[in-house]
Structures are given as structure tokens and as C-alpha cells.
Image (cartoon, rainbow, N blue to C red):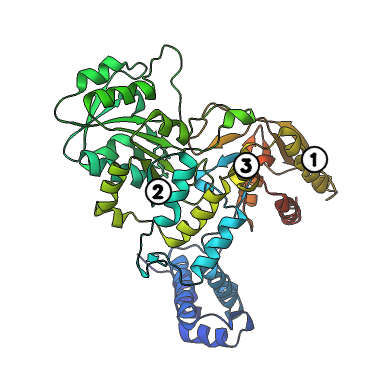
Amino acid sequence: MKITERQQHLLRDLPGIDRLLEMAAADTALADTPRETLTRCARQVIEGLRKSILAGQTPAVDRAALALQAVLEDLRRTVADRLAPRLVRCINATGVVVHTNLGRSLLAPQALENAVRIGGHYSNLEFDLARGRRGSRYSAVEDLICEISGAEAAMVVNNNAGAVLLCLETVARGREVIVSRGELVEIGGAFRIPDVMTKSGAVLREVGTTNRTHLRDYRGAVSENTALLLKVHASNYAVVGFTAEVSLEEMVALGRETGLPVMQDLGSGTFIDFSRYGLAAEPTVQASVRAGVDLVTFSGDKLLGGPQAGIIVGSRDLVDRIKRNPLTRALRIDKLTLASLESTLALYRDPRTAVERIPTLRMLTRSREDIDLAARALAEQLQALDSPRLQVELLDRPSRAGGGSLPLLDLPSRCVALRIADLSAGRIEKRLRGGQPPVIGRIEDDRFLMDLRTVQDDELDLITAAVRRLLQEETT
Ligand SMILES: *Cc1c(COP(=O)(O)O)cnc(C)c1O
């Protein structure tokens, strides 16, 4: 590539790293920046400018851009960008309560406090205080889970995918697991039940068809190679119309008859009967235990509203075998998780307390009237910005449970919709998403919609401030 005379001049004007670092050392804005970071960023800035010059991006790079002050300004921006945390809080105005991309469940204050307490101090994580010797990591939550679910035994691992893997590896490695074709689901993030099975070393034995599976299909597939009958809660979709599914009770009866254990992957898993709150019935963990299922697995951070975890409940004999599996060590739960899980579970001793204090449950059961109050309050704040460019409306739009739970359920909700003169909804969405904190909503008919179900009370002011900044910065 031929370098023009102009490019040569520009390259010559480019300040050296040493000169830039000298300037930076005297700059108050950069005073607290670690040396290593400063050097890296200075290199990145100079290298960036060099590349731009060589690429002939001339309108952007002229002599003024190479003036020391301008380069220093560039360095300040680069440093600020590098030092900014990557994981940040967001305002979820999507109305999707268990939003996997936005962190699924918010923890109850009790759960957060306990994580801080246990994380900041030594604890009896694996120490039996009564006996003064090594103890079990699971004992903190095992009794509690048994008490709430009615199960004989319990244990917890890193997440539900891990729980499924661990159960299958323990019970069915090298042998067959019978499962209905209608339940071979894929959960977001490319978690597919058949793939997990393969990784566990179990051999998948599919029976029935996508829409109809009968007890005789399971029975016909049982052989001396069978290790397990598996039922998967097809949480994120529903088969409707001409369907047939074998009930849990029938599965358990077949298990008893053939001497095979029955496992159920509940996915979201809940201890609360949602039909009492006017929501669709989601199978509860207690119902599976009562039906006599030998192993039940579910997530800690979906409908349960706790930290990311995989919970396994079932018969003492099988859970003990699982605990002895060396794979358990690779999937073990962290102490911060354990601390917040224990506090979350404790709230379930009284279901009413659970619904009040666990944010996921509170948001799911929040009434349209309550959401409407919040929507009106936000609309008023926005109108008080007194901008002739801003148009605010209130709309009825349903929200979703999310997290692959209650897939067909529309939760009646209220949205605040924004239009700003000379600004597309796409632009509004992008700017609010890029703010601090980011506000995540959606676009409908060239309006930006915020569903108030998932917005916390103390976030209304933050949204208003974000819109105020947007109006100031995006002038016409
Ligand atoms: C969500 C889900 C999983 C995975 O659970 P994680 O806790 O996200 O690992 C497994 N099975 C089913 C049926 C699910 O819905």
C-alpha cells in the first residue's frame, strides 16, 4: 500500500507514547488510574490513530485530532471505558419477570443480607459445629427443602442443567432412559435434553410421537437395559389439540411395576400453587413428591425466585448415590449461593410471606391495578419534564412469566409508551439501552414501551432522569 504525503505528515504529527504518558501523569482526571492500565490505553489510542491514518479515514483524523489535548481527551475516554464495570444493573421494563438475559430472579433482601454475612466472614460451610468435625455443605438447606417439599432427601448443585446431568450420570450411565418424544425440549441457550443425556452417558430411548404418548409406549420400551423412566416438564411451550400425555401417577405405577426409578425434570419448579393467585396452574414440587416420583430436579432462580442453583429432591437411597458421585464436586454450589438459597427457602415456610418478600413471586402476582398506579406515576413524572416533543400514553399489554415458565399465560399489565418528535422508537430504545443504568424496553408501532410490572418503585426516578437526558442530548 502506498502512503500519501498527507498520511506521512499525519504520522509524523502523532505524539509518542512517552509524551502522552507524561501529559497523563499531570492530568487530574487520570490521577487514580493504575499505571499498567494507563500504558495499555495510551498504546491503544496511538495505535488506533495510526490505523485510522493508514486506512485513509481522513475526515476524522486531521492535524487538530492529533493535537496533544485532543489525544489526551481520547485517552480519558478510553481509560473510563476500560475501567467501567462490564456487569451492570439494568432496569427491566420488558415485563418478562424471569428474564434469563437480564439475570432471571432478583433476590429477596433477606437472601442478599445473608450472602453478605456469609461471604464476608468464615462460616460453618463444611464444618459440623456440634461435633467439631468436617460436615456436609448440603446440610444448610437439605432439611429445609425436605420440610417444604415433603421429600425424603435433597441436595443442591450449581444449576438445574447440572442437576439433570448428575442424576442421569448416576442412575443411567451406559443404560437406557425412556422419554416421550413430546418432551425432548430445547431450553434457551441451547440446552437440549437429548444433548445432556448423551453427555451423561445415558442412552436415549424415545417413545410415542410429538403430540401423543401412551403408557403402552413406555411399557413396550422397557427392557433389561432400561435404567430410568424420565418425564420432562415441557415448560417453554405447550402441545395443544389432539394430545395425550401419561400422567405422573401412571408413570410412577409403571416404575413400581417394572422396578425402575422415575425421574422428573420440572425445569422452573415451584412450591407455590399459582392457581390460588389467579394464574395458570404450574406443577408444584410437592405434587411430584406426593405422586411418588423418585427424583425431581428444578431451578433455584426461575419461579422459585432464589439464586442460580439446581435442586434435587427424592428418595434417600438415590440422593445418597448422587452425593457420592465424583461429578458432584465439579457441579458444587458456591457458598454465596448457598447462603442466599437458605434464606430464600426459609421464606417459603409461610407461602404468604414468600409471595410478599420474594421479588419474582411478588411481580408475578402483582395486580393490574397496582401496576397501573406505577404506570400513572411514571407518566406524570415524564409529563412534568414539560417537553413539547414528548408524547406519553398508557397502554394495556400483557406481560410474561419468562424463564420457560407458564408459557401460555398472559399477565394483564400496563405499559407506558413514549414517542419523541424527530426521534425514531429505534433510536429511543438504543439510547435508553446505552444509558446508566440501561433501561430495557421494547418497540411497538414506532413507540417505545415500558411494562411497569418488572420496574421497581425506586426506578421510576431513574427512568425519568434517563428520558430527561435523552431529550437534552438528542436535540433536533
Ligand atoms: C430451565 C430448564 C432447565 C435448565 O435449568 P438451569 O437452572 O437454567 O440450568 C432444565 N430443564 C428444564 C425443563 C428447564 O425448563
Q: Earlier in the sequence, mark 3 or mark 1?
A: 3
- 110 w.r.t. 440: above or below: below
Q: Earlier in the sequence, mark 1 or mark 2?
A: 2
Three-letter code for the amino acid on which mark 2 is drawn: Asn
Q: Position of residue 69 (x, y in %)?
A: 61, 79
Q: Nearer the viewer, mark 1 or mark 2?
A: 2
Three-letter code for the amino acid on which mark 3 is drawn: Val
- 440 w.r.t. 36: above or below: above
Residue shown at the point (48%, 74%) measured from the top left:
41
Q: Nearer the viewer, mark 3 or mark 1?
A: 3
User: Depth check: 274 or 134 in front?
Assistant: 134
Relative placement, left or right, of 156 versus 426 is left
CA separation in Å, label 2 and label 3: 23 Å
Residue occupied by mark 2: 159
Relative placement, left or right, of 360 versus 474 is left
Three-letter code for the amino acid on which mark 1 is drawn: Arg
User: Depth check: 397 or 258 in front?
Assistant: 258
Residue occupied by mark 1: 376
Task: Kindly tell me whether residue 61 is visible in this rendering.
Answer: no
Residue occupied by mark 3: 355
Q: Which mark is residue 460?
A: none
- 241 w.r.t. 89: above or below: above
User: Depth check: 384 or 48 in front?
Assistant: 384
